[in-house]
Image (cartoon, rainbow, N blue to C red):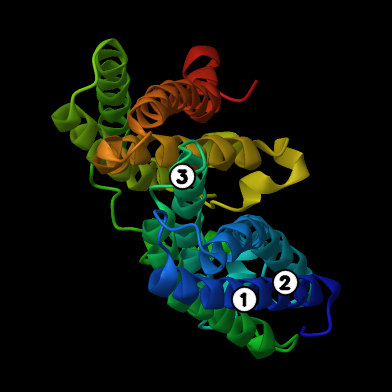
Amino acid sequence: MLLDSWSLALIICSMVVAFLMLLAGRSAIRVLRFWNPASDDNRQIRLENEIWLTSTLVEYGLGVQILSLLVLVLAADHFAGSIPGAMCATGALLADPHGIPTLLVKLAGVFLYGFWLLLHQLDIRSEHYPLVRIKYIYLLLLLPLLAVDITLQTLYLTGLKPDIITSCCAVVFDSSTGGGPLLLRTTQLPILPLFYATALFLAILALLLLRRWRISAGIVHSLGWCWFFGLAMVAVITVFSSYIYNMPYHKCPFCILKPQYHYIGFLLYGTLIPATFFGVTPSLTEPFRKRPGLAQPVAAYQKAAVKTSLLLLAIFTALASFHYLRYLLLGGEA
């Protein structure tokens, strides 16, 4: 599988990102050692010019790494056609023990890489560049995560063999057979009441925050979104997917990405993941309000992020509920 076009695309992108991030890491060390905004000597001027170039390279590198989550899922779906027993990305990811860890690390990276991009955007909103040291310390902390991300991806791609026999999603997510390694044992929990109650709670809290920002409410809002993200993923797998497939025993988070289901999975995940990011980050930016020149940019971001998370929450809930409500109203498949 290593010479497959999808594998080569992932490997080449990772090599480019690693090269850019190593260059940025070298600049980060120089910034932490010599950055002095009160100085106007030649070294400071060179550093100021350097961080603009470095930050641009990091933006592109982290942007590519965020998109690599989508490429990995599409690649796994492509690999499923060559692996016995695999019907979709589920089987391909389970065909090697590094598949699921790679997926989870990349998913976590979407939020962690995205937060660096947010810090950078806030930093350049002020002429004082008050977050330079913070964002470059954070960048250095991201380098081990990036190394783990690329290493797991490489191990997964090199470990895939066309003669491996794996399990299809019908087996992995079938709770009647024990559930397999991916099905969370939540079938006994009131998933739908929890899902809709949490969505309503987040919507009400967002409306209150839009009227008046309170840090305590903002923290609750962020924690609520962390809970809702996991709950929503469980709800999609264990409840909503069956109504999308019109098959009570077909529970899979990847088949909904296929064309026969109108690519609804891209819409679901494409709203849930950004909604979670914009729901969690407003309270995380609160400590930066007191930085020179950032009071207004941070306040503006917090308001815009809460609005965006509320809008995406409404879209995601409507999309996830559509097939379920259609079944209830029409009494079965339309």
Q: Residue 308's spot in the image, x, y percent?
A: 47, 25
Of marks 3 and 2, which one's residue comes earlier in the chain?
2
Q: Disc 2 vs disc 1: Cβ atoms closer than 8 Å?
A: no
For label 3, the residue is 123
Residue flagged by tag 2: what amino acid is it? Leu
The residue lying toward the viewer, choosing from 85 and 124, is 124
For label 1, the residue is 23
Q: Residue 290's spot in the image, x, y percent?
A: 25, 37
Q: Secondary structure at mark 2?
A: helix
Residue shown at the point (71%, 59%) measured from the top left: 74
Q: Disc 3 vs disc 2: Cβ atoms closer than 8 Å?
A: no
The reply to whether residue 160 is in sight is yes
Residue flagged by tag 3: what amino acid is it? Asp
Disc ID at residue 10: 2
Of marks 2 and 1, which one's residue comes earlier in the chain?
2
Residue shown at the point (54%, 69%) measured from the top left: 43
The residue lying toward the viewer, choosing from 240 and 154, is 154
Of marks 3 and 1, which one's residue comes earlier in the chain?
1
Q: Is 234 on the left or on the right of 60, as rendered?
A: left
The residue lying toward the viewer, choosing from 153 and 162, is 153
Spatial distance from mark 3 to mark 1, Cα to Cα? 20 Å
